[in-house]
Structure formats: C-alpha cells, structure tokens
C-alpha cells in the first residue's frame, strides 16, 4: 500500500509541471499578449469563488501579465481579484498597472499590505504608487512604513512631476576615489541587502559626494583586486534633478546611456536613472505626442464616455470654426460655381488632397522637433526640402487629377485649372505643415497639440481659393 502511495506521489510530481506549462501556453499567444479565452476563465473562477483555480491561473502569469489581465476585467472582478494577488508579486504588479486602474486597485489593498509592498519597490516606483493614493490612505500607508523608506518616498514626491527627481531611484552604489576594485567588490557582497535591485555602475564620488566618474560593473569584474577605481572609471553624464523627463530621454538616446547619476544644484549625488525607466518615458511621450497630434487624450480601457467627449469636443469645435471661416472664400464665386457644376465636385478633392499632404509634412516636422533633428541650425534647409517635395507631389497629383477631369468633362481648360489648383495647394500644405510646428515650438507651445488644426484650415482655405480663383481667371 505504501508503495502504491509513493507511485501516486511520483505521478503527481511529474504531471504537475506539465499542467502548469500547458496553462502558461494557454495564457499567452505567440505575441506575448493574453489570449482572449484566458480572461473569461479568470472571471468564471471569480464567480464560482474557486480560490484554488484562481491560484493556478494567476500563478501561470508573469506580474506584468497579471497587470494586463486587470485591464481586461470589469471593475467588480478586479475588486474581487485583489485579495487573491500574491503578496510577493504585488510590488511588480502595481508598478505595471495603468494609472487609472492602479488607483482603483489601491483602494482595495490593505494599508499594511501596501506598506510592505512599497518597501520592496524602487523608490521611484514607490513614489508613483503613493502619489496615486487618496490623502487619508496615503497617511496610513506612510505611517506603516519604516522611517528611512518613508523619507525616501516623501523626498521623491517633493520634486515636480515628469522631472528627473521623480523619475530617479534614490538607491545608488557609490564609492570613494581611493577605493580599489577589491574593496568595491567586498562592499557589494557585504551590503548586498541594501543594494538597488538593478544597477550597472558604481559611481565614484569625491569627499563632497559629487560624482567624478563611474566604474561599470562589467569593468569591475574584469579587473584585478588591487586596481584603483580611478583607473577603470569612465566620465559620467550628470542629470540635473529638475530636468524634464523628455530631455533626460533625449540624453540617454543621444549618448547611448544605460544609467546616469542625478545631482542636486550643488552637484551632490542624490540618485540614478536607469535605462528601464527611460523606456517607459519614451513610450509615454510618444503616445502623448501621437494623441496630441489628433487633438485627443488617452481614453484608456476604462475611460467614461463623458470624459472622452470633454477631451475631444473642444478641438472639434475649433475645427468647426476654422472650417466655417474657410468656406467663406466660396461666397464671392458662387455665381461661377452655379454655372460650372464640375467645380462643386472638385473642391472637396482639392482640399482633401492638400490636407493629406499637409499632415504628411506636419507629422515629419513634429517627429523631427521631438527627436531634436530639427533646430534653427537646419530649419531653412528642411523647409526648402519640404517645399520641393510639396511641389513635386503637387505636379504629380495635379497631372493625375487633371487627366481624370479631362476624361470626365473633356475640357482642357478645366483640367488645367484643377492641375494648377492642386500644385498651389500642395505648396501651401508643405509650407503650413513645416512652418506651423516650428513657429509653435519657437513660442514655447507644444507643436503636436494644435498644428493639425492650423494646417487643416490653411489647406481648406487656400484649396478653395486656388481652385475658384484660377477658374475665374481661365474659365470666365
């Protein structure tokens, strides 16, 4: 009997990993996105109160996938799921959650549990989570934390949002100039519990705790123990604590940095920024620019209808006003339009093609400004290039539309009018598409926010004016 029990235990041990592996395969597709079938499985387990099944389903997921799963669940299911989250995985789950969903989840996490989770997080991630808490709960959570960790979070929250001070983690590895490689390695081993979870450099500091260089960990491991750190350290690119995070991302990208020290105005080392933080910044800034270019804000998976309407409606109203101004140019030509009906069909085509051409130039210009590829040093050359492109495309599209209008109406003069109107509007589209973002950026405005409205107005107004004005000169 005992032998049969042992055989059964061995069978369970061999089958359990296979079942877990099958569950992981079921959870994620080849693109590492959650499979559609997996979310209803979790919701069903929640409805049945099947704690064991929930543990299996969540155990097969990486914390980042659990954060993704929370976004697909209803708010009722999220509330029920919170108590079943593994406390060990909670710090990383909270770091990966969308801001709106995280605020909702934090309401249902006990203060003591949240305080322990914050203690396991980097100071920058912990500060972001605390910033999402309601005032009452924030006070409870901070009061439950050790004094050192609480002070680090409060210090991070003292910096402006979207600056290096908020982005940095305060945990760094620093060593004096006179240390050797052996002393540094011994220090890392001795203080392993106090080290940052992720670091790439040991910052070499002077007596005033100002960074004078950085010794990469890879160089440290290759060097002899008696080699001074000063011999293997490399120059560092210091990041001021009040620098905007978009500027920080630009510096990281330009100089191919993996990490960089953050310093106070006096030059004292106060933290570090690592490349994993910058990846998130680049993604956030890119999404922000894309949304701003269309005049919308991030709707999110759980955004309410009224919130989305409030973010989009003002730009639509502005666009309505600019379009109303643009069509006033048709008034003086209404007698001619009534006589030449073909112009009615051609006007929206001319303005639409010009709008598309303007959007192309605008998108390229906004991206170039954001990546610092467009500056006063090369603006003149870039403007001339876009104008040349606009003229070439205008000639090509004008020829095609002119040829099409000739097939429809067999009027060479009308074909000439359409072709010239397209060329003129493409020139204006290129000019507006490149100049609007440059001028807005020059005056300190975000070129991604309102450039599209300006360009649409220009291409519609001048598209109508070019077509009707040239028609008045040639056809009448």
Image (cartoon, rainbow, N blue to C red):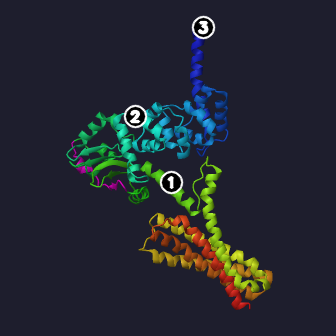
Give the residue at x 63% y 65%: 317
Image depth: mark 3 or mark 2 in front: 2
Question: Who comes first in sequence, dot 1 or dot 2?
Answer: 2
Question: Relative to residue 474, is residue 373 drawn left or right?
Answer: left
Label 3 Cα crowd, 10 Å radius (few <14 / some 14-19 / many 20+): few
Image depth: mark 1 or mark 2 in front: 2
> Label 3, on which residue?
1
Q: CA distance from mark 1 to mark 2?
A: 32 Å
Question: Relative to residue 400, is residue 407 drawn left or right?
Answer: right
Q: CA distance from mark 3 to mark 2?
A: 57 Å
The picture places residue 279, in percent across and down from the top left corner, at 47, 51
The picture places residue 338, in percent across and down from the top left corner, at 78, 83
The picture places residue 245, in percent across and down from the top left corner, at 42, 55
Question: Relative to residue 13, is residue 244 drawn left or right?
Answer: left
The prevailing secondary structure element of the residues shown in magenta is: loop
Is 141 drawn above or below residue 205 in the view shown?
A: above
The picture places residue 250, in percent across and down from the top left corner, at 42, 59
Q: Name the disc covering residue 143, or none.
A: 2
> Label 1, on which residue?
284
Q: Nearer the viewer, residue 125 or 52?
A: 125
Is 446 drawn above or below residue 164 in the view shown?
A: below
Give the residue at x 48% y 39%: 92
């Amino acid at each position: 009997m005992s032998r049969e029990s042992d055989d059964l235990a061995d069978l369970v041990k061999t089958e359990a990993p296979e079942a877990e592996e099958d569950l992981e395969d079921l959870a994620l597709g080849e693109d590492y996105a959650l499979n559609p079938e997996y979310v209803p499985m979790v919701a069903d387990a929640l409805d049945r109160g099947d704690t064991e099944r929930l543990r299996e389903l969540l155990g097969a997921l990486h914390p980042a996938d659990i954060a993704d799963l929370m976004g697909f669940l209803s708010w009722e299911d999220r509330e029920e799921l919170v108590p079943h989250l593994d406390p060990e995985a909670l710090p990383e789950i909270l770091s990966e959650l969308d801001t709106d969903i995280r605020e909702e989840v934090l309401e249902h996490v006990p203060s003591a549990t949240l305080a322990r989770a914050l203690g396991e997080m980097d100071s920058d991630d912990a500060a972001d989570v605390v910033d999402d808490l309601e005032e009452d709960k924030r006070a409870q959570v901070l009061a439950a934390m050790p004094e050192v960790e609480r002070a680090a979070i409060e210090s991070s929250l003292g910096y402006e949002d979207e600056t290096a001070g908020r982005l940095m983690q305060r945990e760094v590895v620093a060593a004096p100039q006179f240390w050797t490689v052996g002393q540094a390695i011994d220090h890392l081993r001795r203080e392993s519990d106090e080290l940052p979870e992720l670091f790439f450099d040991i910052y070499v500091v002077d007596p005033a705790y100002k960074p004078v260089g950085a010794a990469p960990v890879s160089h440290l491991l290759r060097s002899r123990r008696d080699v001074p750190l000063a011999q293997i350290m490399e120059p560092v690119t210091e990041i001021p604590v009040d620098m905007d995070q978009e500027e920080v991302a630009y510096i990281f990208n330009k100089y191919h940095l993996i990490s960089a020290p953050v310093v106070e105005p006096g030059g004292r080392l106060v933290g570090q920024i690592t490349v994993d933080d910058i990846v998130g910044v680049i993604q956030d800034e890119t999404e922000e620019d894309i949304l701003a270019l269309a005049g919308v804000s991030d709707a999110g998976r759980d955004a309410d209808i009224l919130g989305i309407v409030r973010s989009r409606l003002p730009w639509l109203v502005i666009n309505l006003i600019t379009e109303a101004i643009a069509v006033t140019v048709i008034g003086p030509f209404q007698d001619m339009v009534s006589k030449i009906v073909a112009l009615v069909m051609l006007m929206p085509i001319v303005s639409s093609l010009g709008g598309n051409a303007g959007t192309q130039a605008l998108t390229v210009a906004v991206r170039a400004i954001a990546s610092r590829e467009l500056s006063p040093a090369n603006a003149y050359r870039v403007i001339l290039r876009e104008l040349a492109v606009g003229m070439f495309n205008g000639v090509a599209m004008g020829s095609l539309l002119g040829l099409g209008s000739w097939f429809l109406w067999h009027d060479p003069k009308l074909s000439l009018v359409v072709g010239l109107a397209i060329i003129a509007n493409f020139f204006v589209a290129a000019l507006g598409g490149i100049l609007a973002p440059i001028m807005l950026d020059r005056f300190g405005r975000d070129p991604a926010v309102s450039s599209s409205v300006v360009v649409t107005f220009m291409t519609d107004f001048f598209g109508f004016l070019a077509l009707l004005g040239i028609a008045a000169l040639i056809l009448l």
